[in-house]
Image (cartoon, grey):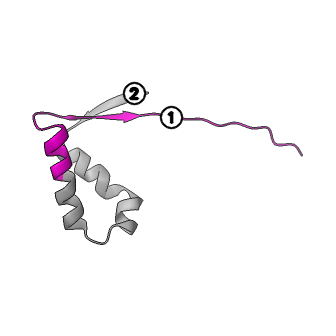
Amino acid sequence: MHSVPMDRERVRNLALSSSYVKHGVADIPAFLQALEALLDATSPNGPVEMRYITRAIAWRVHG
């Protein structure tokens, strides 16, 4: 696992670049308002620590 500290603008841009948001959220302004409320509740005084976990799956192909 590794983590990247992100300010609010970077979190917002990351969220908006997600295909889940682009294609799955009908009301982007309401989504962003909810995101801001979440950031206010969880990280009011500083950056957000975005944790990344990579999982690799390997298998043999017979043929």
Identify the residue at the far left of this view. 45
**Per the image, is 50 magenta?**
yes
Amino acid bearing label 1: Thr
Numbered disc 1: secondary structure: loop
Amino acid bearing label 2: His
| Residue 20 horizontal/vertical position (percent) | 40, 60
Report the side of 62 relative to 19 (left or right): right
Residue 2 shows which numbered tag?
2
Residue shown at 24%/61% (left/top)?
31
Residue shown at 87%/43% (left/top)?
62
Identify the residue at the far top of this view. 1
| Residue 32 horizontal/vertical position (percent) | 20, 59
Q: Nearer the viewer, residue 43 or 15?
A: 43
Identify the residue at the far right of this view. 63
The magenta segment is 36-63
| Residue 6 horizontal/vertical position (percent) | 23, 37
Mark 2 or 1 closer to N-term? 2
**Per the image, is 53 magenta?**
yes
Numbered disc 2: secondary structure: strand
Q: Quadrant of the N terminus?
A: top left
Residue shown at 16%/42% (left/top)?
41
